[in-house]
Amino acid sequence: MDKYIWLIPFLPLAGFIINGIGRNTLSKATIGFIGSVLVLISFGLSVGTFLQVKSTGIPINVTVFDWFAVGQFKVSFAFLIDQLSSLMLLIITGVGFLIHLYSIGYMKDDAGFGKFFAYLNLFIFFMLLLVLGSNYLIMFIGWEGVGLCSYLLIGFWYTNPSYADAAKKAFVMNRIGDLGFIIAIIIMMLIFGSANFADIFQKAGTKEYSAVPYVLITMLLFVGAVGKSAQLPLFTWLPDAMAGPTPVSALIHAATMVTAGIYMIARSNILFTLAPPTLHVISIIGLTTAVVAALIALTQTDIKKVLAYSTVSQLGYMFLGLGVGAYTGAFFHVLTHAFFKALLFLGAGSVIHAVSGEQDMRNMGGLRSKLPITFWTMLIGTLAISGIPPFAGFFSKDEILAHTFTQSTSMYVIGVITAMFTSFYMFRMLFLTFYGKFRGTHEQEHHLHESPPTMTIPLIILAILSVVGGFIGVPESLGGHHWLEQFLSPVFKGSAAIIKGVPSLQQTELILMVISVGGAVLALIYAYVKYIKNAHVPVSDAEERPALVDLSYHKFYIDELYDTVIRKPLDALSVFFYKVVDQLGIDGFVNGLGKGSIEASKGLRLLQTGNVGFYIFMMVVGIISVLMYMVFKV
């Protein structure tokens, strides 16, 4: 199997090249087939690789070629497939294939069909490179590549200025985080003399490297994760990224790219375990992000914006898990979140497709009978993300909350309240969309229909995964053996050896489960009473809202705050540098030299009269001047 591993990322790259070159000549059916099947083959190879790692327990190292060498510093273009990366391969290629299949139906009428599939294939390639790399430099190539593809896909409909602005915003905010990441890599290369994971992790914590500034390195790595995984204060790009086509939202902003930060920290877990202050910061930032995003999601009326802020909130949960040392729990939530959030985004796309592009839930309602497959699959996704047992989200969210309880009771309480918010806003979305009477136009109602099989089949598969996906991590308190924890134990064994004295959860975990599930059910009931029994519909933008509701609806004016505090001062500073430093200073000096030469040449040109007698006179004056100098010189 080892000799075929390079095909896993190469096949999507081949799809990008073929569909990119043939985007205007190949038929849409051919483009969709090539783009989807190549990712499916990569998924098949990923399954084989996963089974090999599972059966042997030995990581697979594959060197594709020697990249470069500078003195003693050598870097190979090599892949590492262990327990962690093998699971990520399954997510990227498996969910990626379903989204490619879904896109065939969703984008069938789009003029840029070929270009869209080329971009999707390129994104899959870079994401695979990110998780396959055996060193930080290859990870960084994939890291930057998915950032580029995110820009291309978010701004895919670039003729709309607001969509183009959203793409630029995502690109710029990601670059802020990426600067921290690359500085951390440089520091590690200087200290450890290598960029390879194996070399760095083996040296980390030893006596020879006990004085390494682990807090500095991990804080810089975390800055990179904050940008890529949309945490405070760099989270505002993700909701705006909903400007891209819905399959983009499902692929990039639910299942893969935004989880890159969690993957990077999980991969570097030993470094973070050696830096407890960084873990504390991560848990605070993660929990704060989860709360703020959930509060904003409570009042949004755009169905994709609700899911976008939900993604930010769930990513906050994952960072909370990392911060309290629950590395397995955080990655477990990455897995389950990939299933139910991709399902919810694709379900939202099915709804938008049915109502002729409408995204405002105030203009929906009563779609349950018209879109039965979409409804039932989205109901499963909503139950999963709300933490209702036995759906997937229940197991992963409970594990994070249980570990949080062992670290801080107050953080646990805030986490449970945030989980209640999650349940409320998700069922609010479900009830406003599928229950009651249809509130759209008569023309929209006339065209209501279920999506084609290319769109509904991925929904069904993801719904099944959202039901059964959590059973890979059933805790011992429920009679399970937590297969995922055992499978990932070799990856986190270094951290497990350092973290000691963690209280047993079996005594209290059942009580904690009852509390979190009870809170989610109470929020569900409240949403039911408000939006079904009382048939409440959010007011229009022209009507007045209560102050707190209005504050949440306008996203706490965070974008406006950034605009006032950061963008406008920077714009003013750039204008100053342009007009004063550039135009008056640099350009003035350079242009002054040019003008001086021109004016001097105008004066000298007056001497060129064309009169021979004048030239003879000037020659005589010159000769006399030379003779006088020779006679009277000292």
Image (cartoon, grey):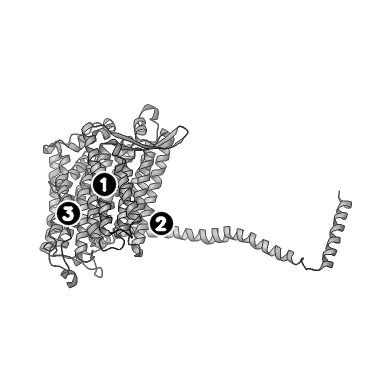
The residue under label 1 is 92
- Please name the amino acid that badge 3 sits on: Ile
**Dot 2 crowding, Cα within 10 Å, few <14, some 14–19, many 20+:** few
Q: Would you say residue 295 is visible in this rendering?
A: no
Marks 1 and 3, how far apart at CA = 18 Å
Q: Where is residue 424 shown, x and y percent of the image?
A: 17, 55
514 in relation to 167, above or below: above
Disc sitting over residue 566 in the figure: 2
Chain-order first, disc 1 or disc 3: 1
Q: CA distance from mark 3 to mark 2?
A: 45 Å
Residue 274, given in percent of the width and then of the height, sits at 33, 34
Q: The disc labelled 1 sits on which kind of residue? A: Ile
* 631 is within the stretch colored magenta: no
Q: Is residue 141 left or right of residue 321?
A: right
Which residue is disc 3 drawn over?
Answer: 457
The span picked out in magenta is 435-440
Type of amino acid at the residue the image marks with label 2: Ile
Which mark's residue is nearer the viewer, 1 or 3? 3
- Along the horizontal axis of the image, is 136 left or right of 448? right
Q: Between disc 2 and disc 1, whose residue precedes?
A: 1
- Residue 416 location (% of width, % of height): 19, 48
**Can residue 562 be seen from the camera position used here?**
yes
